[in-house]
């Protein structure tokens, strides 16, 4: 953690209240709370969790910068993808999962207007009242003319929609189960109470989880001590999203790997990562509620779940290649032709962050699934990474 840890008094109070709840749950779990239950509380506990407590985690003043927070280029490219679907379904609906600060929604609506492809409705599925308030404020400030098209949902719509369901950096925040494997067996990792606060603990893995980990150990030939995680909630979550879509596209952009890369023998410490004030760490137990906790996405599991739900894989590619296929080069050319040197340099820096291998370009992936579309979806005509699934 950076030198600014511990946090200020207000934030510290929030974390202390959440810690009391977690302590009680640890005691009710015989002293070792499964990590996914801890992560659920740390991120989503009403009023106290990281995404629920009203402490802004986005942008320069927060803990990390997402692609939409970098500028409008990402949204303008994404709009080209979404427009190619809305044209096929007759305007339709756009449903954003976890809209963050609302910046992406605002920029998307503006870009879709330019493309003459505004959806009938723009829905945001957001469970946090604090985040909803932030999103409303952003939309009122930036796109007041479109606010009547926006609605917030507590759950997925009961009737399947036609249009686009998408999430940017949402799947990585689904709670994960952690484990430790060695030739002697499998132990599930959890959270316990130590003399100096929270600490890691181990508990016997249930029969199904143990068998699954042993299968992966054999398939990927792990050696020695191997620690990683598994997102048990991902398949059911993807199937529920697929079931909410009658015609259109399910699109996910996030950092992750295909399963063979995810569970490669050399990745023996897993992929869990935490962020606080633009500094990454591997300690998820420090000041719960005040730092982001994420794990890379198993895109193979995502593809399997969507296939089970009867959806067609449109494509799987790097974020850089997705943005190229969505026309980022044309947007840059147009900006250069305007003669505004300052603006062009700003966009160039933004494009570098989105596309360079050392930034978001390769670590982040785009995966799309369609149902009932007769034409190709913009964004997946370049590099095809399906062989890595």
Image (cartoon, grey):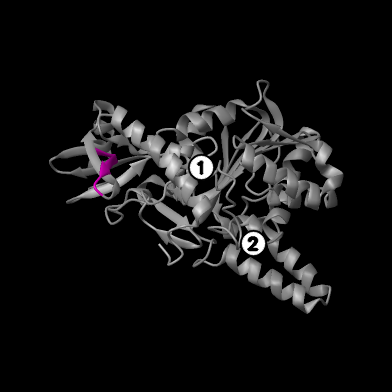
Up/down of 282 relative to 202, above or below: below
Q: Is residue 262 visible?
A: yes
Residue drawn 64% across and 62% down? 70
Q: Quarter of the image for the C terminus: give it.
A: top left
CB-based contact (under 8 Å), mark 1 and mark 2: no
Q: Determine the image quadrant of residue 329.
A: bottom right
Question: Is 214 situated above or below 77?
Answer: above
Name the residue carrying label 2: 70
Q: Is residue 227 left or right of residue 281?
A: left
103 up-or-down from 95: above or below: below
Using residue 222 as the reference point, say whether residue 368 is left or right of it.
Answer: right
| Residue bounds of the magenta highlight | 188-195
Q: Position of residue 64 (x, y in %)?
A: 54, 58
Q: What is the chief secondary structure element of the magenta stretch? A: strand
Residue 338 lies left or right of residue 63; in this view the side is right
- Image coordinates of residue 194 in percent, x first then y, are 25, 45
Per the image, the residue denoted by label 1 is 171
- As measured in the structure, the alpha-carbon distance from the residue carrying label 1 to the one carrying label 2 is 20 Å
- For the point 59% across and 56% down, the residue is 66
Residue 238 belongs to magenta span: no
Instruction: Identify the residue at image location x=38%, y=45%.
Output: 259
């Amino acid at each position: 953690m950076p030198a600014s840890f511990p946090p200020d008094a207000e934030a510290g109070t929030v974390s202390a209240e959440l810690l009391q709840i977690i302590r009680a749950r640890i005691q009710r779990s015989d002293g070792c709370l499964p990590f996914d239950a801890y992560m659920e509380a740390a991120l989503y506990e009403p009023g106290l969790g990281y995404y629920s407590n009203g402490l802004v985690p986005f942008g320069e003043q927060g803990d990390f910068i997402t692609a939409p927070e970098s500028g409008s280029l990402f949204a303008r490219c994404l709009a080209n993808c979404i427009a190619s679907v809305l044209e096929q379904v007759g305007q339709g609906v756009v449903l954003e999962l976890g809209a963050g600060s609302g910046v992406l929604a605002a920029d998307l609506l503006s870009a879709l207007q330019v493309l003459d492809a505004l959806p009938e409705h723009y829905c945001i599925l957001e469970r946090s009242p604090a985040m909803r308030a932030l999103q409303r404020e952003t939309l009122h400030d930036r796109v007041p003319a479109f606010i009547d098209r926006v609605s917030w949902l507590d759950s997925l719509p009961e009737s399947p929609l036609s249009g686009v369901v998408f999430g940017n950096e949402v799947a990585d925040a689904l709670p994960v189960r952690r484990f430790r494997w060695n030739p002697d067996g499998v132990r599930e990792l959890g959270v316990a109470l130590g003399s100096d606060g929270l600490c890691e603990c181990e508990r016997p893995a249930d029969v199904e989880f143990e068998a699954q980990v042993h299968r992966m150990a054999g398939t990927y030939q792990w050696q020695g001590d191997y620690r990683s995680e598994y997102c048990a909630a991902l398949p059911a979550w993807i199937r529920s999203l697929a079931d909410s879509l009658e015609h259109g596209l399910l699109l996910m952009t996030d950092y992750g790997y295909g399963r063979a890369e995810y569970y490669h023998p050399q990745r023996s410490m897993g992929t869990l990562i935490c962020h606080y004030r633009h500094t990454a760490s591997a300690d998820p137990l420090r000041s719960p509620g005040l730092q982001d906790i994420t794990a890379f996405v198993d895109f193979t599991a995502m593809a399997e779940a969507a296939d089970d739900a009867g959806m067609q894989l449109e494509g799987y590619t790097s974020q850089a290649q997705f943005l190229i296929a969505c026309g980022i080069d044309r947007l840059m050319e147009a900006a250069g032709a305007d003669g505004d040197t300052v603006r062009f340099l700003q966009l160039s820096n933004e494009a570098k962050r989105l596309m360079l291998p050392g930034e978001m370009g390769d670590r982040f992936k785009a995966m799309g699934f369609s149902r009932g579309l007769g034409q190709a979806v913009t964004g997946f005509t370049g590099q095809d990474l399906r062989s890595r699934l």
